[in-house]
Amino acid sequence: MEDPKATPFLTDIKELQRRAREHVERRRAPAYRGDVEVAVKLLNESAGDEIVCVLRYRRHYFMATGIHSQAVAAEFMEHAQQEQQHADKIAERIRQLGGAPDFNPEGLLSRSHAQYAEGNSLIDMIKEDLIAERIAIESYTEMIRYFGDNDPLPGG
């Protein structure tokens, strides 16, 4: 019977290591060209915006009353879910940059550009949500200008 150690079925271990390293290096994203610390700070502020919006939309969902409240409440919940997805994507990007997402409720409003305005009627709630969305658009527009070509990853 043949000794299994005498006939290895794998390529030389050094060659396997070299090929694996080469494979990973080829697929690695370009080096980040911006200030990572500033990027993580800005992204955590954006995550704060999204979380505050999730909470505001969810409150509006539960507080909606009146003749059109069911349809409007459903829209509030849909927006809350979308905002949560945005916060998750931002958190993923923060991790890709080597940072830590800051979901600590303490100081959440101070990190967020959005406000947590409750509103007393459906019209007030919708108005406050539209104001928050406008704040987000302005904030993201400025961030896009800041990041420019410094963030080479798709979706980053």
Image (spheres, rainbow, N blue to C red):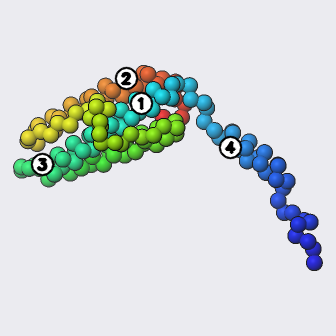
Q: Earlier in the sequence, mark 4 or mark 1?
A: 4
Query: Could you tell me the amino acid type at mark 4?
Result: Val
Query: Could you tell me the amino acid type at mark 1?
Result: Lys
- Residue under the point 61% across and 32% down: 30
Image quadrant in which you'd find residue 86: top left
* Residue 13 in the figure: left or right of residue 102: right
Asked if the residues shown at circle 1 and circle 3 are in contact, with their CB atoms under 8 angstroms apart, the answer is no
Asked if the residues shown at circle 4 and circle 1 are in contact, with their CB atoms under 8 angstroms apart, the answer is no
Image quadrant in which you'd find residue 134: top left
Query: Could you tell me the amino acid type at mark 3?
Result: Ala
Residue that label 2 marks: 142
Dot 4 crowding, Cα within 10 Å, few <14, some 14–19, many 20+: few
- What is the spatial separation of the Cα atoms under label 1 and label 2, in whole angstroms? 14 Å
Could you say which is closer to the camera, residue 115 or residue 26? 115
Question: Which element is circle 4 on?
Answer: helix
Q: x, y (%) of residue 132?
A: 24, 33
Q: Earlier in the sequence, mark 1 or mark 3?
A: 1
Q: Earlier in the sequence, mark 2 or mark 4?
A: 4
* Residue 50 in the figure: left or right of residue 118: right
Dot 3 crowding, Cα within 10 Å, few <14, some 14–19, many 20+: many
Dot 1 crowding, Cα within 10 Å, few <14, some 14–19, many 20+: some
- Residue under the point 26% across and 40% down: 53
Residue that label 1 marks: 41
* Residue 84 in the figure: left or right of residue 17: left
Residue 24: which disc?
A: 4
Query: Could you tell me the amino acid type at mark 2?
Result: Glu
Question: Which element is circle 3 on?
Answer: loop
Could you say which is closer to the camera, residue 156 or residue 55? 55
- Residue under the point 37% across and 46% down: 85
